[in-house]
């Protein structure tokens, strides 16, 4: 799939338009050197490697999604092929809310894993997604960790990690 | 089938720290130390070996490590030989497995050994190994490691209960002070006042360097035997009276409350129930202070401090000699360092030393009848607890 084909999800029109954040240096967006699989945390995303490849295909469309147990209606995170509650494999895909609020956060100021040393310092946090009972962990870009606060609204977004794969993160944009 | 009583009859640890030794050399060193510290033990007595090792594939590029360790130590186990892996609780897992084997009659004399070599030429590679403890595909790419996770625990504890940075530092000061009397500790003969700790650099805010245990090389081993064999090795055995374990979640998204460690409460209830005692009966505890905030939450979850009052419990010295109970007299993970698979074993060595009267005066627990050992692993998602009783008849 070419890197040019990136249809973005339309911006929601319910909220007042917010200015695009000033682009900040984003080390995760530059081309990445390919690391050996066993030293690379980013997962293998294609359908010949994982039964969850639709998650990554939807990321390329700007949609962060997860699986839902069709029997129980429960949202499952991370995405899975089977419900841990009723053990059905009858799961479908649903888009996650685009925003959430920070429940807790910190920052990595040293001791980063291979390939992330030049990202330091970077913020991470647990975010309660709006309207669903899910609390996701992730990078928080867009603001220095010193400017984050508990309860702050952040956007859940997908991004191109630079080697043809996509992942998700949060962006502090208020 | 009757469950047999199991005795801890001795043990040893290597020097913990940044060691100019390979994994294999640490295993050889602990073999020498173990046979020296338990003089009556003969290699042919040891029918089973349980090796706690968290990440030898990552840190030493070595698999099939249990027989590898047996050869280094000069053992030829003929009943059970296996490795236990439970990240930071790999060592206690080895002891629990040995306990189960002896209690069931499968083994009579077992060695539980822990070996970990963590300091590599590239610390980024070592950090990558540590990060693989988390959910590698969903938490790993964000840069999840232990420090930012426990930093979030500290942040929530500070928000919900008003715990202060100085109360965190009180834990670090105490455990480093105990480590001062422990020549095997990574931070032997190093002093850390609360003021000095407050000036150390932030690692993952609000946690500073002194709030975090270290990347450490080291090994430790204990001998566990069936009741009828105990007197062959010591006249001061420590008895395993209870144990419990609970696995709550794995992915960080499924942690629930960061300050209410439900899994620890379950594991503690199981262990206390089997031992027939309660939290107030515990004289000393070796609990998992991978970070200062961990020890504070553990004070509360074990029931020694009221919910939310772990901070004042620390600053009032309730976990110090002269307090409610003595917590981490060995020096803890903060003072001794944390060679993952060796930590749980070294805690049991401290239990034996305290109960047999071999601990140095600076960290002697008064009248130590009941001792508790706790390890968490990963993101505090699994908790393992063991309870020991001093001497007496089986």
Image (tube, rainbow, N blue to C red):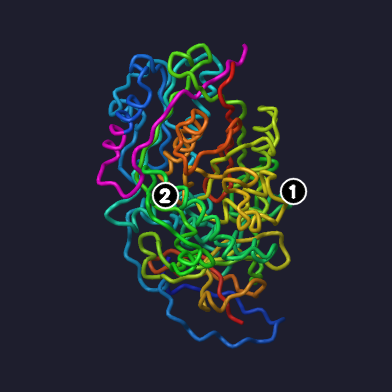
The residue to which callout 1 is attached is A72
Question: Dot 2: what SS?
Answer: loop
Q: In the image shown, does B204 or B225 lie closer to the viewer?
A: B225
Count the labels in the image. 2
What is the x, y in percent for residue B247?
Answer: 60, 41
Q: Which mark is residue B187?
A: none
* Figure check: A114 above or below B25: below
Q: In the image shown, does B266 or B33 lie closer to the viewer?
A: B33
Q: Which mark is residue B180?
A: 2
* Figure check: A141 above or below A75: below
Give the residues drawn in magenta, as a range.
Answer: B1-29
> Residue B3 colored magenta?
yes
What is the x, y in percent for residue A7?
Answer: 53, 74
> Residue B393 colored magenta?
no
Tell me if I can see residue A14 in this picture: yes
Q: Disc 2 is attached to a residue of which chain?
A: B
* Quadrant (top left, top right, bottom left, bottom right) of the C terminus of chain B: top right
């Amino acid at each position: 799939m070419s890197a040019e084909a990136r249809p973005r999800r339309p911006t929601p029109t319910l909220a007042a338009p917010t200015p695009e954040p000033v682009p900040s240096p984003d080390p995760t967006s530059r081309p990445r050197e390919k690391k050996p699989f066993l030293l690379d945390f980013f997962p293998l995303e294609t359908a010949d490697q994982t039964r969850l490849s639709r998650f990554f295909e939807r990321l390329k469309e700007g949609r962060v999604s997860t699986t839902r147990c069709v029997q129980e209606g429960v949202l499952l995170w991370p995405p899975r092929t089977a419900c841990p509650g009723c053990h059905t494999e009858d799961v479908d895909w649903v888009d996650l809310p685009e925003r959430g609020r920070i429940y807790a956060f910190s920052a990595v100021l040293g001791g980063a894993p291979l390939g992330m040393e030049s990202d330091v310092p970077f913020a991470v946090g647990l975010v309660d997604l709006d309207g669903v009972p899910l609390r996701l962990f992730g990078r928080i870009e867009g603001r220095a960790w010193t400017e984050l606060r508990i309860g702050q609204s952040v956007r859940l977004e997908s991004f191109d990690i630079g080697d043809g794969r996509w992942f998700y993160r949060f962006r502090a944009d208020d | 089938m009757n469950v047999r009583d199991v005795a801890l009859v001795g043990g040893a640890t290597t020097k913990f720290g940044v060691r100019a030794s390979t994994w294999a050399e640490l295993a050889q060193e602990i073999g020498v130390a173990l046979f020296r510290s338990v003089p009556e033990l003969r290699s042919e007595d040891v029918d089973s070996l349980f090796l706690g090792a968290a990440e030898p594939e990552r840190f030493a590029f070595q698999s099939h490590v249990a027989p590898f360790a047996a050869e280094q130590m000069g053992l030829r186990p003929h009943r059970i030989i296996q490795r236990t892996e439970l990240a930071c609780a790999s060592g206690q897992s080895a002891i629990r497995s040995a306990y189960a084997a002896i209690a069931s009659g499968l083994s009579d004399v077992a060695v539980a050994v822990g070996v970990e070599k963590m300091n590599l030429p590239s610390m980024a590679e070592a950090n990558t190994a540590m990060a693989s403890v988390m959910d590698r595909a969903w938490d790993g790419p964000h840069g999840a490691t232990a420090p930012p996770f426990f930093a979030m625990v500290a942040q929530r504890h500070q928000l919900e209960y008003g715990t202060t940075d100085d109360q965190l530092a009180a834990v670090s000061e105490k455990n480093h002070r105990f480590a001062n009397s422990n020549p095997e500790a990574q931070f032997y003969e190093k002093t850390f006042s609360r003021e000095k700790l407050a000036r150390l650099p932030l690692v993952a805010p609000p946690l500073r360097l002194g709030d975090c245990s270290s990347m450490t090389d080291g090994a430790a081993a204990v001998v566990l035997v069936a009741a009828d064999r105990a007197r062959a090795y010591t006249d001061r055995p420590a008895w395993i009276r209870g144990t419990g374990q609970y696995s709550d979640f794995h992915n960080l998204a499924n942690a629930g409350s960061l300050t209410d460690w439900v899994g620890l409460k379950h594991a503690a209830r199981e262990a206390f129930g089997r031992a027939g005692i309660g939290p107030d009966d515990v004289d000393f505890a070796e609990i998992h202070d991978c970070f200062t905030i961990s020890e504070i939450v553990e004070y509360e979850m074990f029931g020694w401090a009221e919910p939310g009052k772990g901070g004042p419990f620390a600053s009032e010295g309730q976990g110090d000699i002269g307090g409610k109970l003595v917590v981490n007299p060995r020096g803890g993970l903060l003072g001794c360092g944390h060679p993952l698979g060796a930590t749980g074993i070294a805690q049991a060595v401290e239990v034996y030393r305290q109960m047999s009267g071999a601990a140095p005066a600076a960290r002697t627990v008064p009248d130590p009848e009941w001792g508790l050992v706790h390890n968490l692993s990963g993101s505090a998602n699994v908790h393992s607890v063991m309870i020991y009783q001093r001497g007496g008849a089986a």
